[in-house]
Every structure is written in structure tokens, then in C-alpha cells.
Amino acid sequence: MALLAADTQVQLAWLGERELETEAVVEEVELLCRISEGLAERGAFEPENLRDLQAISRCLAEIDSACRAGLWANALATDPAWDAIRPLARQFLLTTLGDWRQPLPRPAGGRRCFRNTP
């Protein structure tokens, strides 16, 4: 979520020379949104947190398959959906952690790039 909340320039710097597919980013965030519903049922999230994630999920659902194809760096520059997702991710982090500025994940190899590596 910290990566989604970051400014575009920070996201692009984080990507560097990595060729991360937009579809992989969408899948990872969609997974987080789905899991969050179960976590909310267990009391891990407050209702307002779940609403923020549901709003992010709706934005992701509006990204059509043509926009999901290709590199995320290109999508960040051309698809306004990412500009809509950014403030929602910031609001989620602000509500849950008190500040949206969080350390970015360490890049990992493969499709699942958001997980921290040991």
C-alpha cells in the first residue's frame, strides 16, 4: 500500500529498470483487498479501513484489460486510474497507521514484487 500511496516520481524511481507488469500490480492489490474483508470480520481493520480498500478495489475493477497489459511504469504515466488510487491508498495508510508516508517495500524478483524479502 505504501508503494501505491507514493508520488508518481517515487514509484517510478522505485521501479528503476524493473519491468513490472501492470497486471501483476493489479493482482497483488486485488488480493490485499479480498483478504482485508476477512481480516475486517476478525477485527483487524475498522470499517473505515475496509471502505478505503473497497474504493481501491472499485478503481482497479475499472481498469480494462488493455490498460492492464504492459509495464506499470507506462501505466503510471498514461492511466488516470493510478492517480485516483493514490489518494485512496494514502487515506488507508493514514487511517490505519497515522501517516501515509511509509517505507517502500524492498523490491523482490518475480511477479509478486510487493513482498519484503528476508
Image (tube, rainbow, N blue to C red):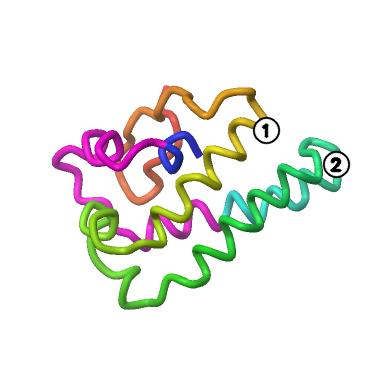
Q: Point out residue 91 in the picture as x, y percentages from the top left corner.
A: 59, 39
Q: Position of residue 46 (x, y in %)?
A: 80, 39
| Majority secondary structure in the magenta region | helix
Q: Can residue 59 be found in the magenta stretch? A: no
114 lies above or below 32: above
Q: Quadrant of the C terminus?
A: top left
Q: Amino acid at mark 2?
A: Arg
Residue lying at 52% horizontally and 63% vertically, measured from the top left: 59
According to the picture, the residue beneath numbered tag 1 turns out to be: 95
Q: Which residue is mark 2?
A: 42
Q: Residue at x 56, y 55 (%)?
A: 56
Residue 110 in the figure: left or right of residue 17: right
Q: Is residue 84 above or below residue 48?
A: below
Would residue 26 be counted in the magenta stretch? Answer: yes
Pick out the residue farthest to the right.
42
Residue projecting furthest to the left: 17
- Mark earlier in primary sequence (2, 1): 2
Tell whether label 1 touches label 2 (CB within 8 Å). Answer: no
